[in-house]
Image (cartoon, rainbow, N blue to C red):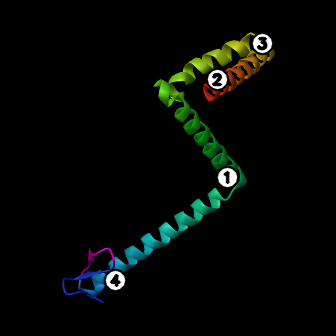
Amino acid sequence: MHNQDGTTGLAGHKHSLDPAVRKQELLREGEFFRSSVAHARAQIRHAARPEVMLHGAIDHATWALRARADALLKPTGTSVSVLMPYGLALFNFIRQRKLGKPAGAAAILLGVAGWYMNKRRVQQQGLS
């Protein structure tokens, strides 16, 4: 199975032509292969656990939401990572002062006002 230049295998590794040395090389390669198969099986077994799958799904959803928010903020020249310290400081302030309900109501009112202004702007652009 040796090529003219003494290489074998798809990776083109140089192997010895001496049968005893070649046997040791094959034994080392076999041990490496078995350990990589065992490692892959352990990774699959770990990834199949429900809490790991849930964590992966949450990570994916978080990444998708952050990418969406970054896309919305791109025209302003900022990103979620720039605004996050301010958001966390505001969240902690609201939580410490127990202003959750008033802050939620204010957020809903601001959302409704923004929706109304956007709707009005679209109607005015459509009529003119």
Which mark's residue is nearer the viewer, 1 or 4?
A: 1
Mark 1 residue type: Met
Asked which secondary structure carries label 1, the reply is helix
Front-most of residues 98 and 71: 71
Asked which secondary structure carries label 2, the reply is helix
Mark carried by residue 53 = 1
Which mark's residue is nearer the viewer, 1 or 2?
A: 2
- Residue 114 relative to residue 39: left or right: right
**Residue linked to disc 4:** 23
Looking at the image, which residue is at 54% across and 67% down?
38
Residue 96, image quadrant: top right
Which mark's residue is nearer the viewer, 3 or 4?
A: 3
Provide residue 93's location: percent of width, then percent of height: 67, 12
Q: Which residue is situated farthest in the right direction here?
A: 101
Mark 4 residue type: Lys
Provide residue 111's location: percent of width, then percent of height: 71, 22
| Whether label 3 touches label 1, CB < 8 Å | no
**Residue linked to disc 3:** 98
Mark carried by residue 124 = 2
Segment tinted magenta in the rendering:
10-16
Quarter of the image containing the N terminus?
Answer: bottom left
Residue 103 appears in the figure: yes
Mark 3 residue type: Lys
Q: Which residue is situated farthest in the front direction here?
A: 128
Q: CA distance from mark 4 to mark 2?
A: 82 Å
Q: CA distance from mark 1 to mark 4?
A: 42 Å
Looking at the image, which residue is at 58% across and 33% down?
69
